[in-house]
Image (cartoon, rainbow, N blue to C red):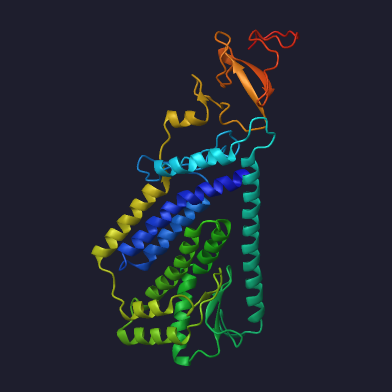
């Protein structure tokens, strides 16, 4: 589980750069179609879901693996953020606090990552359990809803219209919705279903539950919910006249409810950013082509530069191992898991310990306790008087 946790932390750090780019694009292209924002959040979700990273010379990500997989098992743990200032500040702290003492049988870094991994797992379980209980309680509240028509039901136990369900989404309306407002409310909820928002929002919450330790992703989820509603409003009012937009805004105001705690469901009509949505509805103008094209171009640039990772050269590959002439990577002792014992490898010609395990180059292995003396061993393959033939190596 520790390796999974490290992998998710790395994906989270890489995705954070993408989130910052989306926030910048939202700020610069305020008048762009709202579906562009939703598409950008989709790119963030793709980065968080996909465990495979594509290397590219166009990547703007500082580091493909900020936390090496062996960081908590080495004698000198280090991060590789790709930003020199951060590495210069963080690495000395890690080395002084998490490096094992000579002769110690336990690496403090291993204990640290073990505890953090279990805290992460507990957080994931708590958030998913909360959402499951919320969903079941809501289903229980609308169990007595009566059918209005098709997949539309009315209930006296709710305060705002919403969509509930994944495979068979149902629109639930409170009896308090006025007859003249039903048309606009139902059009909004049907737009949610056509856009598959009843899938995207739960997926977003599940990703938030997995990456709950990253505060940027909490902000991303809140903005995702707002952008989903804004894009849906935009889809409904696109062909409306001014009077219809005014009536739609009035329905939005009448159905507004107090904002609930962050959740994956339901898709409520008047729950998220009502004031900003009413203002956007009344001031809506169809985006000009000169606004749409730069927004789309910025989206493509973000996808190319921030969904990929920088290419690793040979020197970077050698940081965690040694490349043989055939291209095979051999792990050195600097990145080998700490086990309380150390292994020395002696060159037969110089006797110097170099820590590289390459028996094909004439190296032989000697073991000694961590911080202790070297056990009896010679480079010609004789151990403590026990002879064996090494000619086949």
* Left-right relation of 6 to 114: left
Q: Between residues 295 and 11, which one lies in front from this camera angle? A: 11
Above or below, 62 relative to 347: below
- Image location of residue 238, percent across then percent down: 34, 76
* Left-right relation of 76 to 82: right
Which residue, as the protein is rendered here, is positioned at the far left?
Answer: 290
Instruction: Tally the marks.
Output: 0
- Image location of residue 150, percent across then percent down: 55, 80
- Image location of residue 352, percent across then percent down: 56, 14
* Left-right relation of 353 to 375: left
In percent of the image, x 64 and y 67: which residue is there?
130
In percent of the image, x 72 and y 9: which residue is there?
388
Name which quarter of the figure residue 213 lies in.
bottom right
Above or below, 9 relative to 379: below
Q: Quadrant of the C terminus?
A: top right
Q: In the rendered image, is residue 79 in sight?
A: no
Above or below, 367 relative to 136: above
Q: Between residues 391 and 296, which one lies in front from this camera angle? A: 391
Q: In the rendered image, is residue 267 in sight?
A: yes
* Left-right relation of 144 to 80: right
- Image location of residue 121, percent across then percent down: 64, 54
In percent of the image, x 49 and y 30: which residue is there?
319
Q: Between residues 94 and 31, which one lies in front from this camera angle? A: 94
């Amino acid at each position: 589980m520790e390796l999974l946790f490290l992998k998710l932390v790395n994906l989270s750090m890489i995705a954070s750069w993408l989130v910052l780019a989306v926030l910048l694009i939202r700020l610069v292209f305020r008048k762009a179609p709202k579906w562009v924002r939703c598409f950008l959040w989709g790119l963030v979700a793709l980065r968080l879901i996909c465990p495979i990273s594509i290397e590219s010379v166009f990547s703007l990500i500082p580091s493909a693996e900020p936390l090496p997989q062996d960081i908590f098992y080495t004698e000198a743990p280090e991060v590789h953020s790709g930003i020199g200032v951060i590495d210069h500040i963080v690495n000395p702290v890690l080395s002084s606090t998490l490096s094992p003492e000579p002769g110690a049988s336990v690496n403090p870094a291993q204990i640290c990552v073990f505890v953090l991994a279990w805290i992460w797992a507990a957080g994931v379980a708590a958030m998913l359990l909360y959402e499951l209980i919320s969903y079941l309680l809501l289903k229980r509240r609308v169990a007595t809803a009566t059918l209005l028509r098709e997949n539309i039901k009315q209930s006296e136990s709710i305060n705002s219209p919403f969509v509930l369900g994944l495979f068979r989404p149902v629109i639930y309306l409170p009896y308090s919705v006025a007859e003249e407002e039903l048309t606009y409310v139902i059009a909004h909820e049907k737009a949610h279903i056509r856009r598959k928002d009843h899938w995207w929002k739960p997926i977003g919450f599940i990703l938030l539950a997995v990456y709950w330790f990253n505060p940027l992703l909490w902000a991303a989820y809140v903005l995702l919910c707002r952008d989903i509603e804004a894009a849906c409003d935009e889809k409904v009012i696109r062909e409306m006249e001014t009077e219809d937009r005014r009536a739609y805004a009035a329905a939005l105001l009448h159905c507004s409810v107090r904002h609930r705690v962050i959740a994956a469901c339901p898709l409520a009509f008047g729950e998220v950013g009502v004031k900003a949505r009413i203002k956007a509805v009344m001031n809506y103008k169809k985006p000009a082509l000169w606004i749409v094209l730069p927004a789309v171009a910025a989206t493509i640039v973000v996808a190319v530069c921030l969904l990929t990772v920088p290419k690793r050269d040979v020197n970077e590959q050698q940081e965690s191992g040694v490349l043989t002439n055939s291209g095979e990577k051999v792990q050195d002792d600097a990145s080998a898991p700490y086990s309380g014992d150390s292994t020395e490898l002696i060159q037969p010609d110089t006797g110097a310990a170099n820590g590289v395990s390459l028996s094909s180059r004439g190296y032989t292995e000697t073991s000694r306790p961590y911080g202790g003396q070297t056990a009896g061993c010679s480079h010609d393959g004789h151990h403590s008087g026990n002879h064996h033939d090494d000619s086949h190596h």
